[in-house]
Structure formats: structure tokens, C-alpha cells
């Protein structure tokens, strides 16, 4: 029986500390009371489980599964499940808190949660992943629920995993409960528009920011790190709006083409190539994939993992605008230099909120037993994203703070007011 030891957070700044640094600044600007500060600083619930799985070779391997609910004060907790080899409790705590702030920024009635299983899905068979999803769901049967905590996809998971989760949860409850999870396949009650929703929100935020910065999309260049759900959809939709995507990357490497990469071709290549860009010929392979982040482009979209823009490379970042598709791609220590350089950073809790917004629409449709058209979904989510951008932008002017701190101020203010009205502590 093999047990994988919890991995320490190494070679990266702790995302929880990064989240707290920004939270502290915003809390001070707002004059948050000590009572509410202490409530919001600590996750409401943290569950860690061991998941013994029979692997295809007949051996049993034990995986660690985590679910953190940061807050459910605005409504049921909401947030994705990450399958990755370096999942760490502090990372999940940060991601759960970011969900609370994100849902508050776009004003949807959810709290924040996040889950993670430390595993490498790229090295597991479909059957092994399915057994892991089902075991994780059963272990969290009293945590999840359409009115309690509603998971969704994150890195390493997608509609397939959400279908297994819904099935396992429904079997345990003795009835079909499709509103327990979002990001499901369409036939199981998924929403039109959810797959592309996060990338679409990145596109809406990028265009809104470019308007403020007076960057013409038809003359703008862009680099996108990460070519999974978020990165590839963001690249595709930005390309459709006129931007030239000169570089893309995934875990296998980065590709550069000064004439612009054909994103639809890149997506087709990835889908026919086991889900990755290895061997892609639509651009030159960059010697150092991390150099994508310091290319001389107008717009940079980090859409892969945390802590990629750090004190180690931020001085070399040349983009005028960073739009964070990923959660936590910029470390708190890099913030000050970004601000000094006059780069506008549209923060994760705003820029990537299109996904949870359409997840909310999916949950609403499931509860109504009704289906919206793609047009209705897109129009409503675009409106929410644009309104949220404007609110955060106005807040940044009012408090004379960067967009990131403004987004935290908007979110914390809303959650704190709700606490004050609800009372009971
Ligand atoms: N899927 C969603 O709806 C949402 C996802 N996010 C965030 O967006 C980010 C990406 O998530 P997804 O696209 O869903 O994941 P995914 O699993 O579909 O894709 C991740 C991509 O990142 C690449 N990648 C991994 N490590 C990399 C590295 N070191 N350098 C370059 N590329 C690397 C992978 O090869 C893959 O292309 C995560 O931070 C996630 O939390 C945020 C909001 C919603
Ligand atoms: O769609 C959702 O409910 C959550 C997506 C997510 O995990 C995120 O926004 O980071």
C-alpha cells in the first residue's frame, strides 16, 4: 500500500500568505472591525480525507482529499475541485477564500469553497480517476449539497468528473440531484456557455481594461500562459476580438509566432494530441517557457497556475495589462512592482469570475428545471462581468488603490455588511 506524503509548499510563495497580505490592506482601508476580520480570516470548515483506491495494477494507493469552506455567509459555498500532484492545504485555503471574494465581487449569492485531491491525473487511467472521484464524493457526502456546498471543475477536472460526482451523490441520496455540482455535461443539466465562461469573462475584462488604457484590440498583441479550459478559451475569444496572440504555452512548453498563432488550429492540435501542445508547429518552441511572461506584448494572460509572476521576474514583465485567468498567478510581493511600473492588473477574483457566474446560472436552471439559451447565458454573464469591472474600477479611483485591492474592498465590504446584518456572533 503506497501513501503519498503531503508535499510542502516549496519554490513558491505561499498563496495563503499572498491572499492574506491583500486582505489585510483592504481590511485596513475599509476600517474592518476586529470581530469581522477574525471571522473572515479563518475558514469556516476544513475537511481532509484519506481515499484508498484500487489502481489498475491491483495495488491500493491512498490519496489525500481536501475540501475547505471559507465562508457560507452569502449563501452555499461554491468552488471547484483541483486534481494536481502539488495540492496543499494552504493552497486550498487560499483558493476557497478567493472564491468568497470572487462571488461577492460579481454579486452572486454564494460563499466560497474549494477542493483538491493530491494526484496526477495525467498518469492515471480513466477508471482510476473515476474511482477517485467517487470515493472523494462519498467522503464529502455530508459536506456537499445544493444548499450547502456546490463543487465545480478546476485544474485537472472537467465535465466528466462532475458527471461522476453528480451520479455518486445522487445514488447516495436515492434521487437525482443535478444541482449539487456545476460544470456538468449538457445532457446531465449542464449550462450552455459554462465551458467557455471563464475564458469569456477574461475576454470581457480584458476589453474593458483595454478601453480604459486606450489600447486598440486590433493593434494589440497578447501572450497566454496555460492552454487548458481557461487559457484556450481566453485566447480564442481574444483572437476573435482582434488581438494577435503571439505566444501560448502549457506544461509541455511555450510557442511563439510574431505573426500570430492560429488559436483554432492550436486547439485542434491539442485535442488530437492527448490534450497538450507538445510538438505544435504553429509557432517556434521557446527555449525557456517562463519567458512567455516577459515578452514585449500589450496584454498578458496567465491562465495556468499560482505564483508565476513573482519578485524573480516581475521587473522584466513588459505587458501594459495583465488579466489573471488563473487563480493567484501573481504573488503579493510582486504587486508593489507591478504598481510602480504602472501596469494594470485585472485580478483573478474579478477577471476569472465568468466561470462561477455561469455556474450560478447552471444551478438556477437546475433548480427551475429549465434551460436557458446560449445567447441568454452569454448576454447575462457579459453584463455581470462588465458591471463588476466598472464597480471595481470606480472603487480603485475612490480609494486610490490598484484594481486588485479595489476588488478585495468591494468583496470584503459586501461580506462584512452581510455579517453585520445577520449578527449572531
Ligand atoms: N476552469 C474554470 O472554470 C476556472 C479555472 N480557474 C483557474 O484557471 C487556472 C487554469 O484552470 P483550467 O484551465 O480549468 O485548468 P486545466 O486543467 O483545464 O488547464 C491547465 C493548463 O495549464 C497548463 N499548465 C500547468 N502547469 C503549467 C505551467 N507551469 N506553465 C504553463 N502551463 C501550465 C496545463 O498544461 C493546461 O494547459 C487555474 O488557476 C484555475 O484555478 C479560475 C476560474 C474558473
Ligand atoms: O464554477 C465554479 O463554481 C467555481 C469555479 C472555480 O473554481 C473558480 O472560479 O476558481
Image (tube, rainbow, N blue to C red):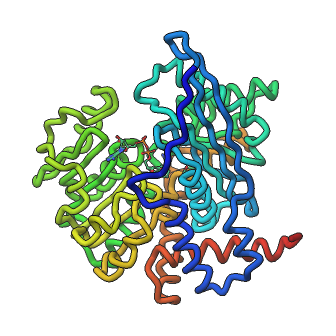
Closer to the camera, 117 or 12? 12
Answer above or below: position of 256 versus 62. below
Q: Please indicate whether residue 363 sits to the left or right of residue 254 in the image.
A: right
Q: Residue at x 69, y 26 (%)?
A: 168
Looking at the image, which residue is at 26% across and 46% down? Answer: 249
Determine whether, in the image, residue 7 is placed left or right of residue 37.
left
- x then y, percent, for residue 332: 44, 70
Does the rendering let one see residue 242?
A: no
Q: Residue at x 54, y 10 (%)?
A: 58
Which quadrant, please, contains the N terminus? top right
Query: Which quadrant of the view contains residue 38?
Result: bottom right
| Residue placed most toward the observer, 107 or 297 | 297
Percent across and percent down for residue 85 are 46, 38
* Identity of the residue furthest to the right in this view: 424
Viewer can see residue 244: yes
The quadrant of the image that shows the C terminus is: bottom right
Amino acid at each position: 500500500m503506497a501513501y503519498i506524503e503531503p508535499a510542502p509548499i516549496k519554490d513558491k510563495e505561499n498563496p495563503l500568505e499572498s491572499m492574506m497580505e491583500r486582505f489585510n490592506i483592504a481590511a485596513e482601508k475599509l476600517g474592518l472591525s476586529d470581530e469581522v476580520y477574525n471571522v473572515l480570516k479563518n475558514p469556516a470548515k476544513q475537511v481532509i480525507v484519506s481515499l484508498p483506491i484500487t489502481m489498475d495494477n491491483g495495488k491500493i494507493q491512498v490519496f489525500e482529499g481536501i475540501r475547505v469552506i471559507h465562508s457560507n455567509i452569502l449563501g452555499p459555498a461554491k468552488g471547484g475541485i483541483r486534481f494536481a500532484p502539488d495540492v496543499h492545504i494552504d493552497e486550498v485555503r487560499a483558493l476557497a477564500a478567493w472564491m468568497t471574494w470572487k462571488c461577492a465581487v460579481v454579486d452572486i449569492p454564494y460563499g466560497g469553497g474549494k477542493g483538491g485531491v493530491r494526484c496526477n491525473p495525467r498518469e492515471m487511467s480513466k477508471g482510476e480517476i473515476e474511482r477517485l472521484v467517487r470515493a472523494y464524493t462519498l467522503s464529502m457526502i455530508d459536506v456537499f449539497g445544493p444548499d450547502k456546498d456546490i463543487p465545480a471543475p478546476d485544474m485537472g477536472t472537467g465535465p466528466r468528473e462532475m458527471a461522476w460526482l453528480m451520479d455518486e451523490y445522487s445514488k447516495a441520496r436515492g434521487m437525482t440531484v443535478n444541482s449539487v455540482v456545476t460544470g456538468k455535461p449538457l445532457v446531465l443539466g449542464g449550462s450552455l456557455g459554462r465551458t467557455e465562461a471563464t475564458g469569456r469573462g477574461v475576454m470581457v475584462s480584458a476589453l474593458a481594461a483595454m478601453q480604459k488604457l486606450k489600447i486598440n484590440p486590433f493593434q494589440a498583441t497578447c501572450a497566454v500562459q496555460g492552454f487548458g479550459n481557461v487559457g484556450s478559451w481566453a485566447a480564442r475569444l481574444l483572437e476573435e476580438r482582434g488581438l494577435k496572440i503571439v505566444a501560448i504555452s502549457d506544461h509541455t512548453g511555450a510557442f511563439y509566432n510574431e505573426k500570430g498563432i492560429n488559436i483554432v488550429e492550436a486547439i485542434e492540435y491539442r485535442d488530437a494530441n492527448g490534450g497538450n501542445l507538445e510538438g505544435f508547429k504553429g509557432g517556434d518552441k521557446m527555449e525557456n517557457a517562463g519567458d512567455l511572461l516577459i515578452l514585449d506584448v500589450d496584454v498578458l494572460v496567465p491562465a495556468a497556475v499560482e505564483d508565476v509572476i513573482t519578485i524573480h521576474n516581475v521587473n522584466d514583465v513588459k505587458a501594459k495589462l495583465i488579466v489573471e485567468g488563473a487563480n493567484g498567478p501573481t504573488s503579493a510581493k510582486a504587486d508593489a512592482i507591478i504598481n510602480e511600473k504602472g501596469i494594470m492588473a485585472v485580478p483573478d477574483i474579478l477577471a476569472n469570475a465568468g466561470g462561477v457566474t455561469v455556474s450560478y446560472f447552471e444551478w438556477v436552471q437546475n433548480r427551475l428545471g429549465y434551460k436557458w439559451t446560449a445567447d441568454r447565458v452569454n448576454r447575462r454573464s457579459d453584463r455581470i462581468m462588465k458591471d463588476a469591472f466598472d464597480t471595481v474600477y470606480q472603487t480603485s479611483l475612490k480609494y486610490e488603490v490598484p484594481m486588485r485591492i479595489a476588488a478585495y474592498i468591494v468583496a470584503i465590504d459586501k461580506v462584512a455588511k452581510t455579517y453585520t446584518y445577520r449578527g449572531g456572533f
